[in-house]
Image: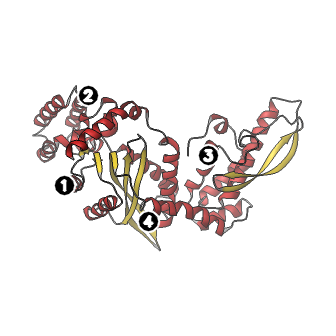
């Protein structure tokens, strides 16, 4: 869901609606009757826009409203459209003339309300405060589509060839009756040969991150068709490196350098950690892989006494921390970390905070995952990033050379 454009974002809500929305959010805006909430919000924003219009045209006056049936994605919406006597005013939030469907930026603005939800019960209470009836059947249908989309995503066939796959896990908490239980979301994001990012899976397992669950997730990806991966980017979770090397023998396994820097700050003293960060900035801009290896070895030797165990692990896994250096300059930053997955996790984290610090059920979590996937793939990931476009031809040539040689 793309970010709303300026003509939408700059419209001011009436104070009365703002208060209703604040009360609704405080009670858990939730998976409410989305159709009615969207209609209310659109009507109020259109009214606010008319007020702004009339303030600069004193010769014109308001002239009531008319009802119009519109469509937001697959959701029918009834909007009360304000008029003026001159007939010249037309709310910018409306679809193009003679069309019933909304622009994507408007959908992004309004469907974002759903992302702040908590529970169906809280949604009904919020609607009651706003003076609107709530249809549980309609509510469940809307939420059910997002939930089902996640299940389908986790089972759908996968293109066997991917330029890169980024994997990481996120710890969350779920409500289970009267208890709050730990759970882990295992996320895999692919960079396809067309340059687009796609979420391959968002699988949820009860409990903390474990190696056994990672085995299940990766085996499932293979079962769904994933085969040839040029670069696989992950963190250094204990034992995971050996598994990914065994399951994807043709891949360059890159250990996340952002995680590496975090670990350096926790294992090294302040002065040594600052030295590590400064030296790493030089390493990642080295002219070639050989120079980067030499500088990395020098860095490890200089800090060996400060944290022997940590430095020993870095030395042993040097080539996995520097695998991104084999790729074109413009794409190295993308390949050096699991930030593609962190983008997913960041969206979920905002929703978690809006939900009071935890997800109120496994279905609510899946709902949030469905919204997140839609937001990214239909928004910022719809087209390849500029850095990817610039290197895409070269990446595809490298892919063909790598796997054609192995065959």
Disc 2 crowd rating (10 Å Cα; few below 14, some 14-19, many 20+) is some
Q: Mark 2 against mark 1, which lies toward the viewer?
A: 1
Q: Nearer the viewer, residue 384 or 42?
A: 384
Give the spatial CA distance, label 4 vs label 2: 42 Å
Pick whichever of labels 4 and 3 is earlier in the sequence.
Answer: 3
Q: Is residue 358 visible?
A: no
Q: Is residue 288 visible?
A: yes
Q: Which residue is the site of mark 1?
A: 242
Q: Nearer the viewer, residue 230 or 129?
A: 230
Asked if 361 appears above or below 250 in the picture, the reply is: below
Give the spatial CA distance, label 1 vs label 3: 44 Å
Q: Is residue 218 left or right of residue 368?
A: left
Disc 4 crowd rating (10 Å Cα; few below 14, some 14-19, many 20+) is many
Pick whichever of labels 4 and 2 is earlier in the sequence.
Answer: 4
Q: Which residue is the site of mark 3?
A: 109
Q: Is residue 332 left or right of residue 197?
A: left
Q: Which residue is the site of mark 4?
A: 174
Position in image of residue 179 (x %, y %)? 43, 71
């Amino acid at each position: 869901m793309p970010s709303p454009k300026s003509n939408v974002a700059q419209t001011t809500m009436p104070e009365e609606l703002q208060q209703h929305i604040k009360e609704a959010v405080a009670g858990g805006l939730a998976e409410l009757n989305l159709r009615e909430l969207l209609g209310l919000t659109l009507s109020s924003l259109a009214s606010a826009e008319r007020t702004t219009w009339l303030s600069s045209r004193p010769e014109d006056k308001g002239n009531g409203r008319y009802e119009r049936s519109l469509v937001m994605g697959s959701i029918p919406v009834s909007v009360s459209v304000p008029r003026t006597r001159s007939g010249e005013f037309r709310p910018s939030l409306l679809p193009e003339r003679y069309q019933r469907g909304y622009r994507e930026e408007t959908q992004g603005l309004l469907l974002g309300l759903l992302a702040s939800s908590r529970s169906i019960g809280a949604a009904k209470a919020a609607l009651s405060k706003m003076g609107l009836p709530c249809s549980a059947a309609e509510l469940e249908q809307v939420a059910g589509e997002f939930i089902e989309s996640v299940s389908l995503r986790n089972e759908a066939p996968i293109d066997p060839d991917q330029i890169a796959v980024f994997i990481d896990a996120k710890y969350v908490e779920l409500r289970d009756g009267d208890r709050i239980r730990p759970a882990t979301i295992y996320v895999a994001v692919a960079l396809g040969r067309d340059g687009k990012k796609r979420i391959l899976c968002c699988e949820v397992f009860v409990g903390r991150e474990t190696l056994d669950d990672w085995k299940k997730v990766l085996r499932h990806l293979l079962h769904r068709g994933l085969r040839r991966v040029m670069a696989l980017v992950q963190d250094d979770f204990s034992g995971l490196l050996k598994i990914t090397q065994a399951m994807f023998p043709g891949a360059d396994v890159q250990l996340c350098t952002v995680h590496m820097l975090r670990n350096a700050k926790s294992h090294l003293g302040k002065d040594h950690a600052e030295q590590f960060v400064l030296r790493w900035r030089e390493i990642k801009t080295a002219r070639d892989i050989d120079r980067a290896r030499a500088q990395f070895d020098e860095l490890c030797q200089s800090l060996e006494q400060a944290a022997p165990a940590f430095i020993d692990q870095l030395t042993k896994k040097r080539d996995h921390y520097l695998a991104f250096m084999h790729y074109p300059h413009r794409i190295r930053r993308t390949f050096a970390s699991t930030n593609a997955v962190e983008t997913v996790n960041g969206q979920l984290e905002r929703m978690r905070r809006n939900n009071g610090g935890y997800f109120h059920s496994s279905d609510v979590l899946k709902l949030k995952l469905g919204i997140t996937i839609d937001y990214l793939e239909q928004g910022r990931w719809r087209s390849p990033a500029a850095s990817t476009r610039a290197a895409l031809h070269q990446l595809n040539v490298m892919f063909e050379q790598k796997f054609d040689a192995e065959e």
